[in-house]
Image: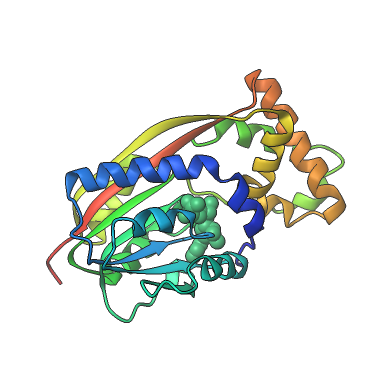
Amino acid sequence: MTLEWDAAEYEVVSVPHVGWGVGLLGRALERRPLRGDETAIDAGCGTGKITELLLRHLPDGTVLAVDASAAMVEAARERFAGDGRVRVEQQDLVRLQVERPVDLIFSTATFHWIQDHEGLFGRLARALKPGGRLVVQCGGKGNIARVMGATEEVMDDERFRDFFEGWEDPWNFADAETTRARLEAAGFEEVETWLQDEVTRFGSIDELARFLKTVVLGRHLERLPESEQQPFADAVAEKVAAAEDAFTINYVRLNILATRGRGP
Ligand SMILES: C[S@@+](CC[C@H](N)C(=O)[O-])C[C@H]1O[C@@H](n2cnc3c(N)ncnc32)[C@H](O)[C@@H]1O
């Protein structure tokens, strides 16, 4: 089932994501600059903040911005209203359909929400032209480990326990080697995958709780009545802050640069 996002809140709190997006694009384009007239997909575009970064490099190109969340799609459509280079579609990436294969697929902070990476990479390969490029960053092995520990402790609290019966973690934090093998099996070449630590600091416990609530804990919160959602996020933030002795999330990003092979 599709997770719905609070797009307005996400737009405000997703500050670290912009830095990650700039870093990834910079690195990818240093290796192979764009001409500026390519066709691209932003896979999991959210509100379109990072799509904007991509568009700066595509003055004569086009971007198909895809997201599964209705709220995110609406926000991205508003953002790009009047920009003929962008089309926004609500689609599940695991079943991605495109009219014509594109030159570039770009994606940030999305693939760890998808369990079936083999299926996903197969879809992406089919959506790319032979020789087309995949540029991705998402959560990787070890990502938000302390947040996960703190969240499990809070879920086990008497106040919340009954809501999490049959719970399975929503994230897929893959490692670099497994991801490389999956990409090669899906027909990608020149595959580079690597993990990167990104310690992210917040100014206060309230800022940390707000961020966790909007960006990290969506799947948990949808199990809870509204009245319990803020207390749950606050409790996780308190435990994270206590364990870290700071308002910090230890992110580990998985980076992917790959080229769709020229074979069938
Ligand atoms: C953390 S946001 C990242 C948004 C944007 N790329 C950024 O970096 O700010 C993750 C996005 O992935 C989308 N998403 C997650 N699973 C998806 C799927 N299977 N198909 C399409 N979008 C998906 C969510 O709806 C959400 O908008």
Position of the C terminus by quadrant: bottom left
Residue 83, by quadrant, is bottom left
- Image height check: is 125 above or below 212? below
Compared with 159, 74 (above or below) is below
Q: Is residue 184 visible?
A: yes
Q: How many marks?
A: 0
For this orientation, the residue located farthest to the bottom is 99
| Residue 14 x %, y % | 56, 46
Q: Residue shown at 55%/69% (left/top)?
A: 78
Q: Which residue is rendered at x = 35% and y = 66% of the image?
A: 41
- x, y percentage for residue 36? 22, 61
Q: Residue furthest top?
A: 245
Left or right, residue 227 beside residue 29: right
Question: Against 243, is 60 above or below?
Answer: below
Q: Nearer the viewer, residue 174 or 68?
A: 68
Color scheme of the displayed model: rainbow
Where on the picture, by quarter, is residue 86? bottom left
- Picture coordinates of residue 80, whole percent (x, y): 48, 68
Q: Name the residue nearer the viewer: 102 or 75.
A: 75
Q: Is residue 140 above or below residue 201?
A: below
Residue name at image x 66 percent, y 21 percent: 243
Residue 110 visible in the shown view = no
At 73% from the left edge and 52% from the top edge, which residue is drawn?
Answer: 221
